[in-house]
Image (tube, grey):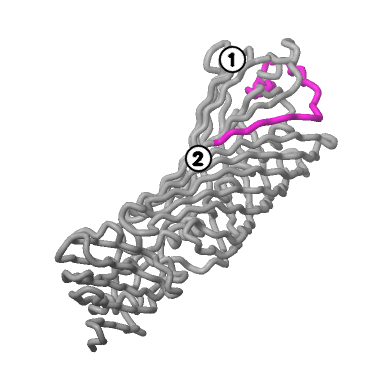
């Protein structure tokens, strides 16, 4: 209805709306009542004459709604246009005043769930129209990466730490001479120990090759068991979630070190420290999650038969995350970023056996580890507060590894190995669901295979490679771990 002095006002608020839209690569979202109202021409009109004003008011927008407003001027440079939030403060003012101005505004969901669009004529005609589409706000995309990707960071670190501790315990309980560097799939391990006399190395090598029980071979001289050992373990992991719409690619490095002390021949305790560095890229959200963290903890083991042992680990980690999502080139307030931290607790236990037979060595195992992480509330760069959340994630595994030490030449030995494991992942999270699916780790049963080999010279020099492929049986997911290790005698 016309108002005095040629002014016009349109004030409408919709309660219902159902429009399905999609933003490149993310799941469909439902339009809000406000967005539905815009699409029914609630921001539309034109005025002419100095001081003539047209005001449109629409409420009930949701975070992620993208309102695209077109302002057309009969004469460039004349008339004004502004967009204001619920508190009356301007969220956009057209200062360029071109003949045609197109503004895409992304609703943050704070003070802009109601919007007022106002045009004022300076004489020549000025008109306004708008459309709206539901979408994922940059802050929502940021939250999606936090909720769905940080558990994958945690479970990858859990695998690295527990794997490193398990190998360190096996090294400490080994009665034969060990090379200064050993390792497994995705790991390189340096065992720092006193140098052995050359006269001890050769018999110990024959013992490791299972020659002791062969006719004509003298019993090797066994080196005294060491009580202390220092070790360092490195692991590189690449995880890919390729479901087409929401592809995620990551690189994560874990370095773990420890100190072991044997308490007699069948028990030990130790301290462990670790560092992790990671980056997860999500092309569909134009964003990434990266960060680093430190770990400290303790472990212990008991060998209750010559072939069986049980162990346990408890560790605490402080992890710092940095995330960014969205593109500022297509929408106002289209980029969100922020930093947050997490406190993580890891607990694990396992049962491992070792059975040599006919030159082969079989190592069956059953292991479980669980991680609890709490992340404090934080505020992103757009001013939206992200709530505190807690999650739990774990993995139970059963399987085994088979190796066969053999002489390659008179001075070099070769030890290949293969292994297969069945993994079951389970998680729980108290965070509210986000409308972006398939970014993170999937719960359920999967398979994992490992393989590798090592060349070791009589002088102790070793060259080895290994690989691990996990996530077998999961749709569109794969987890690659690569290893390389070498020995420098000292």
Prevalent SS, magenta region: loop
Foreground residue among 297 and 268: 297
Q: Is residue 78 left or right of residue 152?
A: left
456 versus 371 height, above or below: above
* Image coordinates for residue 425, horizontal then vertical, percent: 54, 56
Q: Is residue 435 left or right of residue 331?
A: right
Residue at horizontal 58 percent and vertical 30 percent from the top: 188
Residue at horizontal 24 percent and vertical 67 percent from the top: 79
Where residue 30 sits, quadrant-wise, is bottom left
Residue at horizontal 41 percent and vertical 59 percent from the top: 138
Earlier in the chain: of badge 2 and badge 1, it is 2
232 part of magenta stretch = yes
**Circle 2 crowding by C-alpha within 10 Å: few under 14, some 14–19, many from 20:** many
Q: Please say whether residue 351 is visible from this viewpoint.
A: yes
Residue 428 is tagged as none
Residue labelled with disc 1? 457
* Image coordinates for residue 246, horizontal then vertical, percent: 36, 55
Residue labelled with disc 2? 237
Q: Please say whether residue 185 is visible from this viewpoint.
A: no
Magenta-highlighted residues: 207-235
Question: Which-is-in-front pick, marks 2 and 1?
Answer: 2
Give the Cα separation between the discs numbered 2 and 1: 29 Å
Secondary element type, mark 2: strand
């Amino acid at each position: 209805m016309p108002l005095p002095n040629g002014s016009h006002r349109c004030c409408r608020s919709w309660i219902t709306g159902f429009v399905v839209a999609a933003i490149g690569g993310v799941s469909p979202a439902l339009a809000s009542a406000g967005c539905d109202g815009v699409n029914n021409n609630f921001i539309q009109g034109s005025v002419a004459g100095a001081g003539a004003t047209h005001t449109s008011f629409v409420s009930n927008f949701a975070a992620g709604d993208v309102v695209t407003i077109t302002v057309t001027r009969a004469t460039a440079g004349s008339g004004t246009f502004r967009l204001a939030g619920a508190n009356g403060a301007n969220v956009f003012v057209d200062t360029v005043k071109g003949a045609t101005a197109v503004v895409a505004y992304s609703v943050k969901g704070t003070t802009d769930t109601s919007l007022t669009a106002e045009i004022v004529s300076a004489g020549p005609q000025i008109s306004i129209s708008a459309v709206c589409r539901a979408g994922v706000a940059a802050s929502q995309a940021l939250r999606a990466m936090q909720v769905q990707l940080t558990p994958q960071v945690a479970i990858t670190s859990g695998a690295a730490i527990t794997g490193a501790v398990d190998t360190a315990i096996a090294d400490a309980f080994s009665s034969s001479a060990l090379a200064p560097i050993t390792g497994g799939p995705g790991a390189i391990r340096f065992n720092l120990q006193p140098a052995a006399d050359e006269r001890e190395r050769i018999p110990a090598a024959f013992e490791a090759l299972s020659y002791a029980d062969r006719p004509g071979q003298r019993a090797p001289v066994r080196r005294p068991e060491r009580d202390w050992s220092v070790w360092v373990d490195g692991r590189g992991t690449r995880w890919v979630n390729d479901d087409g719409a929401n592809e995620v690619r990551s690189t994560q490095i874990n370095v773990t070190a420890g100190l072991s002390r044997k308490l007699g021949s069948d028990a030990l305790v130790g301290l462990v420290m670790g560092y992790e560095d990671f980056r997860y890229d999500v092309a569909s959200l134009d964003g990434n999650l990266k960060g680093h963290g430190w770990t400290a903890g303790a472990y212990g083991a008991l060998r209750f038969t010559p072939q069986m042992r049980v162990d346990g680990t408890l560790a605490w980690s402080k992890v710092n995350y940095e995330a960014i999502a969205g593109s500022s080139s297509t929408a106002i307030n289209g980029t969100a970023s922020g930093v947050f931290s997490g406190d993580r607790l890891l607990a694990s236990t396992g049962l491992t056996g070792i059975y040599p037979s006919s030159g082969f060595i079989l190592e069956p195992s059953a292991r479980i580890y669980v991680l609890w992480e709490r992340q404090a509330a934080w505020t992103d760069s757009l001013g939206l507060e992200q709530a505190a959340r807690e999650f739990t994630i774990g993995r139970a595994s059963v399987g085994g590894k088979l190796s066969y030490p053999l002489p390659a030449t008179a001075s070099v030995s070769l030890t290949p190995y293969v292994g297969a494991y069945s993994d079951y992942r389970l998680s729980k999270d108290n965070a509210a669901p986000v409308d972006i699916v398939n970014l993170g780790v999937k719960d359920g049963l999967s398979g994992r295979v490992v393989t590798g080999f090592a060349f070791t010279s009589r002088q102790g020099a070793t060259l080895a490679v290994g690989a691990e492929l996990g996530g077998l049986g999961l749709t569109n997911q794969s987890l690659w771990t690569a290893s390389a290790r070498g020995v420098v005698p000292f």
